[in-house]
Amino acid sequence: MPKLEYQTAGESHGPTLVCTITGLPAGLELDADYINHELSRRQGGYGRGGRQRIETDRAEFVTGVRLGKTTGAPVTALVKNKDSRLDDLERTPPVYRPRPGHADLAGSIKWLTTDCRETLERASARETAARTLGGCVAGCLLRSIGVETFGFVRQILDVRTDVEVTTENWRKVRSDRDESETYCPDAGATEKHKAIIRQAKIDKDTVGGLCEAHVFGLPPGIGSCMDWRDKLDARLAYAVMGIQAFKSVEIGMGRASATVHGSALHDPIHFDAGKKTDPTLGFVRTSNNAGGTEGGMTNGMPVVVTGAMKPIATLLRGLPSVDLNTKEPEHSQYERSDICAVSAASVVMEAVVAFEVARSAVDKFGGDSLIEFKDNYERFIETARILPLDPPETVIA
Ligand code: EPS
């Protein structure tokens, strides 16, 4: 069975970013408008720096695609950098004063140099353009079985929106998000976010926040409890923690689950025959504290993931550091950067969540072609819907 995997390459100021995706079934139409729209959303959000005025990110598929559809071969796509100057020592000088909170110090020691440039060029969140691209390709696969993803900003610094997101209202919430300069579906919170970011800019400071992603239309049984490495919630956590500057991940109620009784936490199961044709197969819950996963598998409820992004480590006013050559105290070196990239990170997070869900869906439904993938999905749903099978499983009294 094919395994869905992706990898990225490229430096922030190199000629191009690259995303390679293997294990996609043949015959999947890649929705270039959707992918490019998400790439351009990732470039946006209030609080971004000057770089985004230079770049116009677009996906350029160079392998594994013919006439807009996957062939089953590895797919390689490029996002070209306009601000390409990696070998120009005047415009990308060495960095000897590491930024606290950045990969600079650990990377320079790891690769035995006092110049943090090579580490920071690869550690840069510019790379997330390539990961977003990969996640959107996975999103195209998910859409073929009616699964959709939605990501937004829940909080910046200490200003949070309490907007509820449900299977019924998420499209409306998404259009509210699209009205917001901070990608937060709450006009009042957005204004406060903008004020926070403006003040941080005046203070030569930076801010972080919380991103949230929801996945709708998943049947129960994606992911597995048989091998811990196949648990969907574990994969989601791995992927979200892999985004630059993310410091924690929660599924559903997450950390707060530890503070309530089981009777209050666990989402009661009901059977609603009227919903038997839904991906839930009729097994509905009155709450979704589990965030759509139980035992590392989807349970039919929407998957809900929250990720916390720390403030960007590049501060205009610098932070206490040392010069790696002299070991003398110095302020960290400033590189052009963003004040707040939480909005952009919400696009990245939605994409990496989509990729992990698609990876687990490919594990379950497999197939070399999209036809087989979709047939396997349909057959599973149809069989699950008619449970108990004939003859019924033995009931032990
Ligand atoms: C980043 C520094 C800035 C950001 C960059 C992440 O880049 P530059 O040094 O070119 O101004 O804009 O993010 C992007 C380029 C992007 O596309 O998201 C960093 O140091 O992580």
Image (cartoon, rainbow, N blue to C red):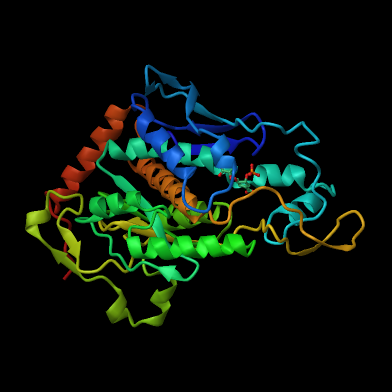
Task: Give above or below for 86 relative to 181.
Answer: above
- Residue farthest front in this picture: 202
Decide which of 254, 161 is in the foreground and name it: 161
Q: Percent position (x, y) of residue 122?
A: 67, 42
Q: Quadrant of ligand 1?
A: top right
Q: How many marks?
A: 0
Q: Quadrant of residue 39?
A: top left
Q: Quadrant of the C terminus?
A: bottom left
- Residue farthest left in this picture: 274
Position of 346 with respect to 105 (left or right) is left
Position of 309 with respect to 284 (left or right) is right
- Residue farthest top in this picture: 67
Please give the name of the residue rendered at 75% of the width and 51% of the height, measured from the top-left corner. 107
Q: Percent position (x, y) of residue 379?
A: 20, 39
Is residue 1 among the parts visible in the rendering?
no
Task: Give above or below for 378 relative to 314.
Answer: above
Q: Quadrant of residue 394?
A: bottom left
Q: Percent position (x, y) of residue 217?
A: 25, 49
